[in-house]
């Protein structure tokens, strides 16, 4: 065949084909979520999870515990960020979702002043009820920002809580992502809440290896790392207890719709109660270090806790 | 468009000027990092390039190596260097030196090579030493191309020097990172505009220098 330039009709057809393909693709993606609406009224409990490995492990633990008690479960995991999945929970497409107390409360009540775990949970119960939802028992497991120091630094000055930082007489530098500089849990908050003075230096890796390196080098003395991050244990870092609620409490908490029966809620509450903060760190570590699937990690943990 | 206007308003806001985090201070830091990176790279790359261009030796190896360095992503290199050297300005500076190196090297050897061979041969036949050949014939004739290398390197470095803020409290990149993470998009866009403006000004200045370096008479060898 000789080369023929595209005729307008051909281009038009190609465009129609491309557009319809795109539309079909979109439909395909939204299908699983909309089918949840159908399932929402039935016996099947639709469980969702964030696109965050730690959250998926918790969701998987809920799913397996419910399945062990002969509940029908549908998994809608790896949905993504809160903006994406929260509407699905609110409209009942998803029945059960592992959430975090403080961050969720701040979405529903942006003006809240609750910081400490029990205050946050109490207000979250009210906020959920307004949405026609309920939160089950909060777990002792937390996944929140925390101040960490090296073991050597903690021992040198006898540090256990953030309050203890007042005992440190040498200048301290705090390293974190740049947004921390002007957040309530940055240098200003530390000064106002605890009366501790620190300098600030930006390290844009979100408490990753460069932050750990800076701590070990002594370039910084204080950093923010998630409590559930395996790197705290691996690098022998010490988390300072936040006695005055500088950081928003963020306990793992299941959000449930009316389709979750009291019997099912009881099972989930047992799972939540069994999960200690250390357990969550270990679960995350298995995901990071051994690269095991969430289902395997959750199953091993449930068996170990006698929940399967 | 309103975001654009917000960004301009952010730059115009007097509260963002002066002091250790002020725009003026950040611009100076940014320029210092840029000049330091290009300067350090030039100290090594330009003599090496001139040597290669003059002798015609080792060209393949060095050019291949420089090309390989060019392919290294700067952020990846910065993270690696940061893990070795710790936080601070050293790791970003080294990463930027690596970024500037290939362009400077290419400009230097291509410049020297581009000198008219007839002129070089004539100079040699009147008894000039090799050193005189380089300094009085090849470099003046190749300055245009050599400065082109400096210009390319500077443009790359001034735009990429935002990465200095990744692990140090330096430069205009601070506005980008802080604005992005805190969703202060006016601040972020303001940072980007300032970097773009700085890049443009530097490029114009170097272009003028490049034009001035061209021999005023005779045909310019290309």
Image (cartoon, coloured by chain):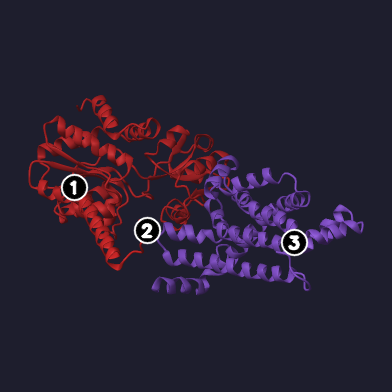
Chain colours: A red, B purple
Residue A205 in picture, x, y percent from top left: 47, 47
Q: Is residue A173 visible?
A: yes
Give the x, y percent position of residue B187: 46, 65
Q: Marks 1 and 2: in contact by CB < 8 Å?
A: no
Q: Which residue is mark 1?
A: A32
Q: Chain of mark 1?
A: A
Q: Which residue is mark 3?
A: B142
Q: CA distance from mark 3 to mark 2?
A: 49 Å
Badge 2: residue crowd in 10 Å (few <14, some 14–19, many ≥20): few
Q: Are marks 3 and 2 in contact (CB under 8 Å)?
A: no
Numbered mark located on residue A21 in the image? none
- Secondary structure beneath disc 3? helix
Q: Is residue A266 above or below residue A173?
A: above
Q: Which quarter of the picture shows residue B194?
A: bottom right
Image x and y of residue A7, in percent = 31, 66
Separation of disc 1 and disc 3 at Cα? 65 Å
Furthest residue toward front: A1
Q: Is residue A118 left or right of residue B56?
A: left
Q: In the image, A8: left or right of A45?
A: right
User: Disc 2 or 1, which lies upstream in sequence?
Assistant: 2
């Amino acid at each position: 065949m000789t080369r023929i330039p595209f005729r307008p009709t051909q281009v038009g057809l190609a465009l129609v084909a491309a557009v319809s393909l795109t539309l079909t693709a979109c439909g395909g993606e939204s299908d699983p979520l909309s089918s949840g609406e159908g399932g929402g009224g039935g016996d099947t409990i639709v469980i969702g999870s964030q696109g965050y490995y730690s959250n998926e492990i918790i969701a998987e633990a809920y799913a397996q515990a419910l399945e062990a008690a002969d509940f029908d479960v549908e998994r809608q995991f790896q949905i993504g960020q809160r903006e994406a999945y929260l509407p699905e929970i609110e409209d009942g497409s998803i029945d059960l979702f592992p959430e975090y107390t403080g961050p969720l409360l701040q979405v529903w009540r942006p003006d809240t002043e609750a910081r400490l775990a029990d205050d946050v949970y109490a207000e979250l119960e009210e906020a959920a009820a307004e949405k026609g939802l309920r939160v089950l028992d909060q777990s002792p497991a937390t996944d929140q920002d925390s101040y960490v120091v090296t073991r050597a630094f903690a021992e040198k000055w006898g540090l256990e809580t953030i309050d203890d930082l007042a005992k440190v007489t040498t200048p301290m530098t705090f390293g974190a992502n740049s947004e921390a500089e002007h957040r309530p849990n940055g240098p200003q908050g530390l000064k106002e809440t605890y009366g501790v003075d620190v300098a600030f230096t930006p390290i844009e890796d979100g408490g990753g290896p460069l932050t750990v390196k800076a701590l070990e080098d002594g370039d910084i003395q204080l950093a923010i790392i998630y409590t559930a991050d395996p790197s705290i244990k691996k690098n022998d870092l010490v988390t300072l207890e936040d006695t005055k609620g500088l950081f928003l409490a963020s306990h793992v908490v299941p959000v449930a719709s009316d389709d979750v029966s009291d019997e099912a809620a009881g099972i989930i509450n047992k799972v939540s109660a069994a999960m200690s903060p250390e357990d969550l760190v270990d679960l995350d570590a298995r995901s990071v270090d051994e690269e095991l699937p969430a289902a395997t990690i959750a199953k091993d943990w449930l068996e170990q806790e006698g929940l399967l | 468009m309103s975001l654009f206007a917000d960004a301009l308003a952010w730059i115009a806001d007097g509260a963002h000027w002066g002091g250790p985090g002020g725009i003026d201070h950040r611009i100076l830091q940014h320029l210092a990092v840029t000049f330091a990176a290009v300067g350090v790279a030039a100290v090594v790359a330009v003599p090496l390039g001139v040597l290669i261009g003059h002798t015609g030796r080792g060209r393949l190896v060095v050019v291949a190596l420089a090309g390989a360095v060019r392919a290294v992503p700067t952020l990846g290199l910065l993270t690696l260097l940061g893990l070795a050297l710790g936080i601070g300005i050293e790791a970003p500076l080294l990463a930027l030196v690596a970024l500037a190196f290939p362009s400077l090297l290419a400009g230097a050897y291509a410049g020297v090579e581009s000198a008219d061979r007839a002129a070089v041969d004539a100079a040699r036949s009147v008894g000039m030493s090799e050193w005189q050949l380089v300094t009085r014939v090849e470099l003046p004739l190749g300055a245009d191309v050599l400065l082109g290398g400096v210009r390319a390197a500077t443009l790359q470095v001034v735009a990429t020097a935002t990465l200095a803020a990744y692990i140090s409290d330096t430069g205009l990149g601070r506005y980008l990172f802080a604005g992005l993470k805190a969703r202060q998009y006016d601040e972020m866009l303001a940072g980007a505009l300032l970097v773009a403006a700085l890049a443009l000004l530097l490029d114009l200045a170097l272009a003028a220098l490049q034009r001035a370096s061209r021999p005023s008479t005779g045909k310019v060898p290309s």
